[in-house]
Image (cartoon, rainbow, N blue to C red):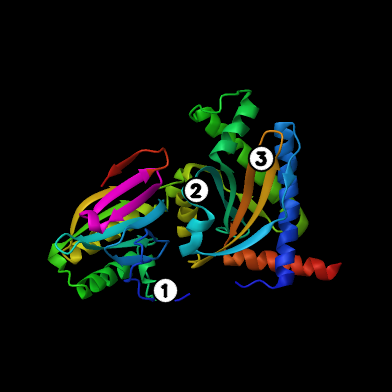
Amino acid sequence: MNANKIMTEPPSPSGQTAMIGIGEYRVGSFPMMTIGLGSCIGLTLYDDTLKVGAMVHIMLPDSAGRKDRPGKYADTAIPLLLKELNALGCKDRSLVAKMAGGACMFEYFGTNLNIGERNATKVRALLKEHNIKLAKEEIGGKVGRSVTFLPASNGKIMVRRADGTSGEL
Amino acid sequence: MKLSTIQADAIQELGNIGAAHAATTLSQMLGSTVEMSVPAIKAIDISELGTYMGEESAAMVAFELQGEIPHGGYIIFYISKESAIRLTNTMLGLTDMNRPMNEMDESALLEVGNIMVSAFLDATAELLGFIMLPSPPALSLDMAHAAMSSLVAQMGEEVDEVLLFSTELVCEEHKIDSDIIMLPEAQTLARIVELMENMMKGI
């Protein structure tokens, strides 16, 4: 599978929601969605002047030099999204980031290996490094989350949980 | 790791024996017949995991595989939320399907998972002489994808494709549908394949 394929074009002419699996990302103004985030992070970057955004489903904090799936790791995903958004005319200073996920689904395994927390810490550090404002986050706990991102509707983001509750991020 | 047909058959046979023992314990706990499927081997790209397990609510009792190989992967007792309620209702003598799950349900699910997975691993250890011990169980009652992807994220050997072995266990009488899913690390898989091949050569 070629993970380096360009993910900037809309998924379909009808503007259907693009489902973003683990390690995948999309850039554009069409609706995007990640389902069932556990320790993974759903990160969005949004430019309000152009109504364009990007979403990525990050699984791990560090790529350790791997280049084949840039969306899978925080340290490769963030520079890549910025590059793709810049190519669409977005300025870094007008971009706003939001993120959800980073949970610890299994308490027993989580005690010595909290990947969710490590993911969130890494994303925060990288955003700071690139001077991108992190406007909101819903991170941690023992809860799965699905995230819908609507760049064309002022970058609206909805977070839905397994118990049926949902809210705007 | 790419499996040959013979290796896949060997693993299926192992799954068959393990799941048959697990099915027997479930049958005893429910006092009812439990049917099992032929074990399936699935290779799933992580980006496609959502099509295999999505947002649906499920109970997952997960164990790390320990023993000769210290971090050997995971084995999971998977049961949809509806089936989980029917299972605990049957065990606890309750009938209300629409009640919220409580600590009693969680204890019952942990216990059922523990008994079934122990039976599975006992049977495979006896067959192969390869000891895989279950860690203490951990329970997630949430979106199936959230739980499964979290386990995949913490595997020692980093993977882009998940290889998992699942066997479905169904109790018709109580409409309970569950799965035992094994998510082995590459090292565990290689060891199982080697032992199964040796055993088949010996016959």
Q: CB of mark 1 within 8 Å of CB of mark 3?
A: no
Count of labels shown? 3
Q: Give the image location of residue B40, x and y in percent.
A: 67, 58
Q: What residue type is labelled 3?
A: Ile
User: Which quadrant of the figure contains the C terminus of chain B?
Assistant: bottom right
Which residue is denoted by mark 3 in the rendering?
A: B115
Is residue A102 among the parts visible in the rendering?
A: no
Circle 2 packing at 10 Å, graded few (<14), some (14-19), many (20+), is many
Is residue B117 among the parts visible in the rendering?
A: yes
Q: Seen from this angle, which residue lies furthest front?
A: A14
**Image side of residue B178 versus residue A155, left or right:** right
Which residue is denoted by mark 1 in the rendering?
A: A3
Among the two numbered marks 3 and 2 on one chain, the one whose residue lies closer to the N terminus: 3
When the figure is inspected, residue B75 is found, relative to residue B44, above or below; the finding is above
Name the front one of labels 3 and 2: 2
Q: What residue type is labelled 1?
A: Ala
Instruction: For mark 2, name the chain.
Output: B
Whole-angstrom CA distance, mark 1 to mark 2, is: 25 Å
SS of the residue at dot 3? helix
Which residue is denoted by mark 2 in the rendering?
A: B144
